Image (spheres, rainbow, N blue to C red):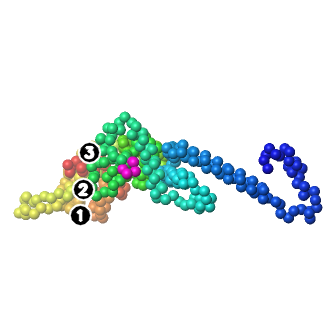
Amino acid sequence: MKPSDLATSDKWWKRPTFLTLQEEQWPTKPDTGLLEEHVSREMKAEFKREEHLTTTDLATVSNVSPTACFGLERFSTSKKLFRVTGYVLRFISRLKEKVKSIGESQKSGDESVTVKELEDAEVMCLQEAQKPLVSSNKFDQQRISLGLFTDDKGVYRCKGRLENAELPCQVKHPILLPPRSRLTSLIIREYHSRVMHHDVKDSLTETRCRYWITKGRQVVKAELRNRAECSRVQGRPSAAPATPDLPQFRAEKSFPFANTAVDFAGPLYVKNVFGGESKMRKVYIALFTCSSTRAVHLDLVPGLDAQPFIRCMKRFFARKGVNQLFISDNTKTFKSKEVRQFILNMGVAWKFNLPRSSWWGGFFERMVRCTRG
C-alpha cells in the first residue's frame, strides 16, 4: 500500500474486516502473496537505482585519491594510515567488480588486509605526497642533484652512489619525501620508535635506510622537538645543588703546611747514579700541599709500603715542622696500622675523604696533575 492511499483506506482508519468476526473464524494464514510480490518489485527497482548511482559516482571520482577524502591528519601512525587505505582500496575494487552477493561480501569483509593491499596503499600515499615536489619550481634542480628516477610503481627514488654496494635496493635507492608533509611526519615517528626514542642522529640514520627527506636533519629535529614523550626523556637535567662553602681548614688563616693534603703520584722509573747498577727502579712521588697557601713539597719514596712513607713524613716534619692536620683519600698506605700509630704519637689529626668521592680532594688532585705535566 502506498502512503497516498492511507487517507482513503478503511483498513488504516478502521480495522480489517476479519477482526469483527469470532476468533474461530479468523483466517489461519494471511494472504501475503501480493504483498511479497509488491515488496520484491520495489527492492529490485531500488537496487537498480543504487547500482546506477554507484557506477556514476565511481566514474566521476575515479581520479580522486582515497587519502584526499579522509585526510591524513586523522591518523597518528603510518601503519594505521596504510591499513585504512588498504581497506578503502579493497572496497573500491569490489564496487568496480559489482559484487552483488550479500553472503559473499559479508564473508570477505571479515578478512584482514593483505600484504599486497598494504603495499598498494603505501604506493598511493607516497605518490600523493610527492605531487607537491613535482609541481615545485626546484624540482628540476633536485632531479639533477639527487639523480631522481621513477620505479616500476611510479614512485620517485634517489639514485645515489651505492649502486655497486651489496645492499638492498631500497637502501641504495631511497624514496624521496617532501619536508613538509603529514606522511613524512608519520614516517619519522615510526622510525623514531624503532630506535627506542634515541636522538636525531639515530632516527635520521634509520629513516634514510628507506626514505630520503630533503633537509632531513632539520625536519627530524623539528619533529622530535614537538613530541611530549621525548621531551620528558631527553629534557633538561634537574638543577645542580648549590655549591657549599669551603671547609674551615681551606679558608682559615694559618701557618704554611699547618693543614696539609698528601697524595701519591707515579710511578716513575729512575736509575741509581751513585751505585754501580744500571737497572731502572720504580719510585713514587709523595706530594704534600698546603690547603690554604697551595705550597707544594715533593719527595721520592721507593714504594707504597708503610715504612718508606713513614721515613718520608719524618723528612717532611724535619723541613716544614709538625703540622696539625693531614687530608687524604682512602689509600691503603695511609690507613695502615703503622702509619696511624706514627701519626698518633706525633699528635697530628688525619681526615679521610668520603670513599669513592675523588672530587672531595680536587685541590690536591689538581697539584698531582700539575706535577705529572
Residue 223 shows in this picture: no
Magenta residues span: 151-155
Q: Is residue 263 left or right of residue 300?
A: right
The circle drawn on residue 336 is: none
| Of pointers 2 and 1, the one earlier in the residue sequence | 2
* Mark 3 in CB contact with mark 1 (< 8 angstroms): no
**Residue that appears at 84% across and 44% down:** 7
Residue 35 percent location from the top left of the image: 77, 55
Q: Say if the magenta span includes residue 296.
A: no
Q: What is the three-letter code of the residue carrying label 3?
A: Arg
**Residue that appears at 24% across and 56% down:** 264
Residue 25 percent location from the top left of the image: 92, 63
- Say few, some or many: other residues with alpha carbon within 10 Å of mark 1 (under 14 / 14 to 19 / 20 or more): some
Check disc 2 and report the residue beneath it: 264
Check disc 3 and report the residue beneath it: 294
Q: Is residue 223 left or right of residue 149?
A: right
| Of pointers 2 and 3, the one earlier in the residue sequence | 2
- Say few, some or many: other residues with alpha carbon within 10 Å of mark 3 (under 14 / 14 to 19 / 20 or more): some
Total of numbered circles in the picture?
Answer: 3
| Of pointers 3 and 1, the one earlier in the residue sequence | 3
Taking 236 as reference, is 317 above or below it? below
* Mark 2 in CB contact with mark 3 (< 8 angstroms): no
**Residue that appears at 12% across and 61% down:** 280
Q: Say if the magenta span includes residue 153.
A: yes
The mark closer to the camera, 2 or 1, is 2
Kindly report the distance in space between the C-alpha atoms of the residues bearing marks 2 and 3.
16 Å
Q: What is the three-letter code of the residue carrying label 1?
A: Asp
Residue 78 percent location from the top left of the image: 47, 50
Residue 216 percent location from the top left of the image: 37, 44
Identify which residue, 82 or 191, lies in the foreground.
82
Check disc 1 and report the residue beneath it: 305
